[in-house]
Image (cartoon, grey):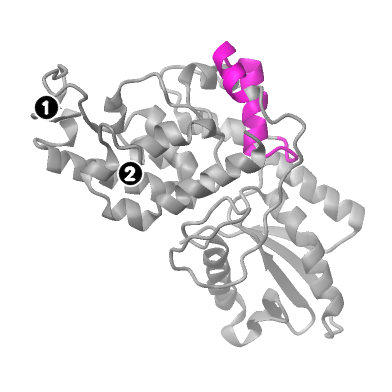
Amino acid sequence: MTINELKDLLNAFLERWTVDNVRQMTLQEYVGVGNRDTFCQWVETKTRMLGSIKGFSSIKFGIYERKNPSKKPKNYQNDDKYSWRKNYGANRKEAFENVKRDILRIIDLAERGKFKEIDSIPLHDFFKWKVAFLYSNERLIPIYKREVLNKIAKHFGLSVNNDTTVSEIQDVMVSNKPAHLNVYEFMRKLYSQFGDAKDKDEIVGRGRGEKRSTRKAATTRNTDTQSRKGGRSYIADQKHNKIQLSLMKKLIGQYQKENVILEKNFVDVKVIQPDCIHLYEVKSHSYASDCMADALGQILWYAFNDSDTRPKKLFVVGQYEPTNNDKRYINFIKQNLKLDIDYCPIGLE
């Protein structure tokens, strides 16, 4: 698949499984024999090109419907139809509600970039990190096989043992991702170095020579859940607008409400100071370098067209702290273009 096709596949998943849909889903919608539209079917099979989690039994889902109802696996809780991990409850209803609770927690943590907290959730690593990626705004690298992750971690200088968490390895991968590669290109690069023959055949040997796609900024401030087709990698919660609202609250606390102006002449946020003007352009991309690259032309145009003669300080705002590669790119812009511009990370509330 091409990179654009991978992004479209992610969008299709997020359109089908909005947070509201996950919150309202039944056990039959979560997992079931012969149903190709379940949440688990989407995560494992339909989005396989966004990272494979094949190779482990269906207990990775926390609860599953047995193909042969008479074959009840040992060491798990069973009824006449379903099997589940004992720690999730004494009956299928209780088990499913607890599994769904954990799924919703993974989604929430992934959206907010709180990946370390996902490690302690008792679902299988394969499954929970695939779910985390799907809702992470492409902030994780879609590799889930532990043997491959360990090789990558060692390559980047992380000492790996049985206590090394997936979030630690993801941190190492993300911090070493070149700014010019998106997560899919980087995934393929890593699989070409550290994956087995099957990984290379299935994942690496496709889509070479593609041009990198770009994504457009949001145009409204509505933070309700909605679906929207297009190049954006995140659909479920209008992330741009949530970042914008968090920024507004922060700036009002610093500069007082009367000095903070929202979306005047297309500028996301403008702050009036006695001796200068601050202009803020909000982007919802996964990395600071992408936010800077997308925002630079816009914010320069806004500064050029602003009739106020006071000096202008420019800010590009995104959700995440910049990686080392992001910082190199930001410094390159500042030094070579001689701009008074900074990147400002604003976490979601």
Which residue corresponds to mark 1? 78
| Circle number at residue 308 | none
Q: Residue furthest top?
A: 197
Work out whether 319 lies above or below 66.
Answer: below
The quadrant where residue 68 appears: top left
Name the N-terminal-most of marks 2 and 1. Answer: 1
- Pick the residue in front: 186 or 326: 186
Work out whether 4 lies above or below 348.
Answer: above
Q: The residue under label 1 is which amino acid type?
A: Asn
Work out whether 217 lies above or below 35.
Answer: below
Work out whether 9 lies above or below 83.
Answer: below
Judge from the rendering whether residue 334 lies leftward or rightward of residue 119; answer left or right. Answer: right
Q: Quadrant of the N terminus?
A: top right
Helix, strand or loop: magenta stretch: helix
Judge from the rendering whether residue 169 lies leftward or rightward of residue 179; answer left or right. Answer: left
Q: Secondary structure at mark 1?
A: strand
- Residue 193 is one of the magenta-drawn residues: yes
Q: Look at the numbered discs 2 and 1 and tell me whether their residues touch, using CB distance below 8 Å.
A: no
Which residue corresponds to mark 2? 103
Judge from the rendering whether residue 340 lies leftward or rightward of residue 183; answer left or right. Answer: right
Residue at image position (81%, 63%) is: 297
Residue at image position (59%, 39%) is: 6
- Residues packed near mark 1 inside 10 Å, few (<14), some (14 to 19) or many (20 plus): many
Q: Which residues are magenta?
A: 178-203
The reply to whether residue 154 is in sight is no
Q: Position of residue 21 (x, y in %)?
A: 34, 54
